[in-house]
Image: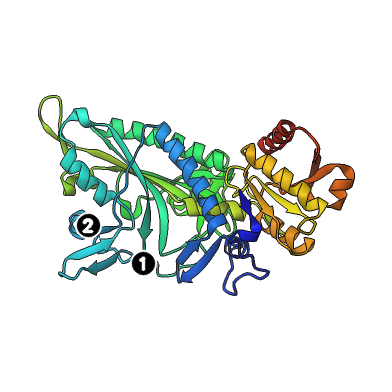
Amino acid sequence: MTRLSGYLLPTEKQPPADAEAISHKLMVRAGLIRQMGAGMWSWLPAGWRVHQRAVQIIREEMDAIGGQEMLMPVLQPAEPWRKSGRLGIEELFKLTDRKGSELVLAMTHEEAVTFHVAQIVRSYRDLPLILYHFQVKERDEPRPRAGVLRTREFIMKDSYTFDRDQVGLEQRYELHVGAYDRIMERTGLRFYRVRSDVGMMGGLGAHEYMAPCPAGEDEIALAPGYAANAQVALRDPDVRKVGEHYMRAGDLLSIEPAIEVGNIFMLGTRYSEPLGARYLDERGDEQLVWMGSYGIGPARIVAAAVEQFSDEHGISWPRALAPFAAHLVVIGADGSPERQAADRLYHTLCAGGIELLYDDREVGPGEKFADAELLGCPLRLTVGRRALDSGEAEVQVRRGRRDAPGLPLGGEDEQLIRAVRELWQSLP
């Protein structure tokens, strides 16, 4: 049960002076995040609730394909990174301890998970495996920007698959394609799965999950039945330039900015070979483990949702990510009939499992409504003099700012709870 009079939600009338991206502006103004330094952000209570909604969706879909959750350290010995050939990456934070031992702050966990598998997996009977975790990543980002979209520290879900051969890897890869598609669909985002480069990860092939929006730093090339990272598209032999435009198979390619929310890689033996991840097959012969790597950023899901679903008044969360189901606003002083009616409604709905943020502050209605629209919970319930006169709490759906049927203040508890749940479940 959450009353705004005691809740840390420091809303702001103006965005940060350096903010350009909509998500940067609105997430600060709505009291979701605060900056501590360049590329270093704290998630405040309401923002963390949204972040954890994304985490839970991801966790459920990873578990559904047989993933096993674990946790690996951020601080790691440098040696596995030296063996993999990635110690020289500029964005990798490097340090030494008091004894002079070389360490790194991990930006991803291929080295760590392969190190463990190399010690644990012995036989073909130990495979396949899907291991994943949610962990902080550190990246010496040269140009942090756009709020939580490009940071030096962030939480990522990274999963890793381990198979006997390429056929097994391709099967586990397809499982992740299905899981990532479902994650994106459940979050409500508009997205494209596009072919991409393997980059510093290496391996046999990769796809990116892109959420189109103006703040995106990446570009995707789109045509009927075709979607690719723009750089990959320009190397496609079927793509040719005609005047100022690019064409593919007779179709005009449109280029659209997008946020990279997730990526999936077929690594093959890129890490298992230098780090010694091998197993004995049915004949007793030693073979290299085949690997895949799959990342997705909860913070980027959250920021993409703000980018895609906001208006001039604030955020409009998709139901799956909203910090609260409804924002209850009371227009009436402490001890008034309006406050008593709002208190009863609050306790009734909370007891029924409806997650509410109750604005019980002693401030004017204009400030309350402005904050409710800024935070963007899918429903707003208002109890004031008009509600008492009509016998119904006013209901507004945030997406589109449309009115919905009122809630009878004198109705049965079960009816009230059912009405809110049915309305909630009808929302995008």
Q: Is residue 9 left or right of residue 84?
A: right
Amino acid, disc 1: Asp
Residue 109 in the image: x percent, y percent? Answer: 30, 51
Q: Nearer the viewer, residue 388 or 260?
A: 388
The correct choice, above or below, for 39 with respect to 378 in the image is: below
Q: Is residue 260 in sight in this rendering?
A: no
Q: Are marks 1 and 2 in contact (CB under 8 Å)?
A: no
Q: Say few, some or many: other residues with alpha carbon within 10 Å of mark 2 (under 14 / 14 to 19 / 20 or more).
A: many
Label 1: which secondary element: loop
Q: Earlier in the sequence, mark 1 or mark 2?
A: 2
Residue 242 in the image: x percent, y percent? Answer: 56, 53
- In percent of the image, x 25 and y 38: which residue is there? 290
The residue pinned by badge 2 equals: 81
Residue 28 in the image: x percent, y percent? Answer: 58, 65
Q: Is residue 320 left or right of residue 395?
A: left
The residue pinned by badge 1 equals: 140
C-alpha gap between disc 1 and disc 2: 16 Å
For the C terminus, the image quarter is top right
Residue 23 in the image: x percent, y percent? Answer: 58, 60
Q: Nearer the viewer, residue 273 or 41?
A: 41
